[in-house]
Image (cartoon, rainbow, N blue to C red):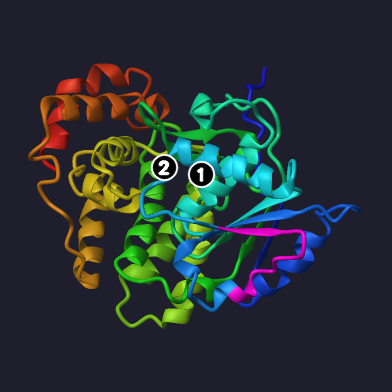
Amino acid sequence: MAGTFRNLAVVPRMVFGRGAFGQLEEILSSARGETGGSMIFLVDDVFKDHALASRVPVGKSDHRVWVNVDVEPKTVYVDELTQQARSLADGTPAGVIGIGGGSAMDLAKSVALMLNNPGSSADYQGWDLIREPAAYHVGVPTLSGTGAEVSRTAVLSGPVRKLGLNSDYTVFDQIVLDPDLIADAPDPQRFYTGMDCYFHCVEAICGTFLNEFSRAYSEKAIELCREVFLEKEIDRREADEKLMMASYCGGMSIAYSQVGACHAMSYGLSFVLGLRHGEGNAVAFNQLEEFYPEGVREFRRMMDIHGIELPTGVTRDLTDAQMNKMIEVSLSMDPLWENCLGPNWKSEMTPERARELYSRM
């Protein structure tokens, strides 16, 4: 008898190409319905004084909300934005559009979910806890690498842990991939975000959940990351297009698989120390040669080429309570560790081993 396979939810509509952002108004018109319902645009506030601000197609019944992602998204912020969206729209808006990097898109996904699900977003941190479909939501990335534009996860820090809203309903209804929008991404942010994609795929390829679906996307994304970050003479415009597609493929690679030790340990670093996701991943990955030897060596070559110096000694001054919390957060990521080490992972990744790994960082 055939086995039971996951019925994968993917983004149903996407547009890719330079200038694609100009089609957003037309795309949204079909989602407004006959009443011309209002849209809530959640836009990274880094664009307040940027030309992009004037290009956001805010209609007369719409509202633009500047969101701050200087720190990673928190459940309390999502709850505040959800109430603000309801108030501005005088009810439930017709849709939510996230414009920005992975954090801005995660905020948009989270707000869209919480518009139709009661309680706090902290109640839904975990896997498949969301019960009702999200409001219509669109993702427009201005950074590439996180794969947030295609993933079923919205990563949030809650009262007790950092954990995503993992649900088929989290997936965007539409994404707009315009390489022009990532042209001004600054280094080292561009590097760290791109490495998030690279780490996704190394973890997937080395994982116990690997299948040919995941392998195909992972291998293509790694190939593109190598072209972007190992070739010194690549044209920036060409690199932006490749990086945007690497991010898409990287996100798809874990849709039918999972990430692993790097992300599990990064979640602890982010929750306790406040490290941004990409930087936390890089700090963690650099010390995981025993799990991903070839990947770590290649990552170090990429850092050398791009002049990246990682923070060091970030866990040196932690209290015992902080270290214990970091370990607790990391070891709560069961699917990630199972992908890395198999179903009996708890016998291998003990709190003592996790402590030793963290102590290197």
Looking at the picture, does residue 203 appear above or below residue 311? above
Task: Please say whether residue 358 is visible from this viewpoint.
Answer: yes
**Corner quadrant of residue 213:** top right
The image position of residue 240, as x and y in percent, is 47, 73
- Tell how many labels: 2
Rendered residue at 24%/24% (across/down): 349
**Corner quadrant of residue 83:** top right
Q: Tag 1, which secondary structure?
A: helix
Residue toward you, 78 or 245:
78
> What residue is shown with label 1?
214
Kindly indicate whether the residue at mark 1 contacts the one at mark 2 (C-beta within 8 angstroms): yes
The image position of residue 49, as x and y in percent, is 48, 75
On whether residue 77 falls in the magenta region, the answer is: no
| Residue numbers of the magenta segment | 54-65
- In this rendering, position of residue 334 left or right of residue 315: right
Q: Earlier in the sequence, mark 2 or mark 1?
A: 2
- 3D distance between C-alphas at marks 2 and 1: 7 Å
> What residue is shown with label 2?
204
The kind of residue on which mark 2 rests is Ala
Rendered residue at 63%/75% (across/down): 55
Task: Please say whether residue 252 is visible from this viewpoint.
Answer: no
- In this rendering, position of residue 197 left or right of residue 30: left
Q: Tag 2, which secondary structure?
A: helix
Q: Residues within 10 Å of mark 2 (few under 14, many from 20)?
A: many
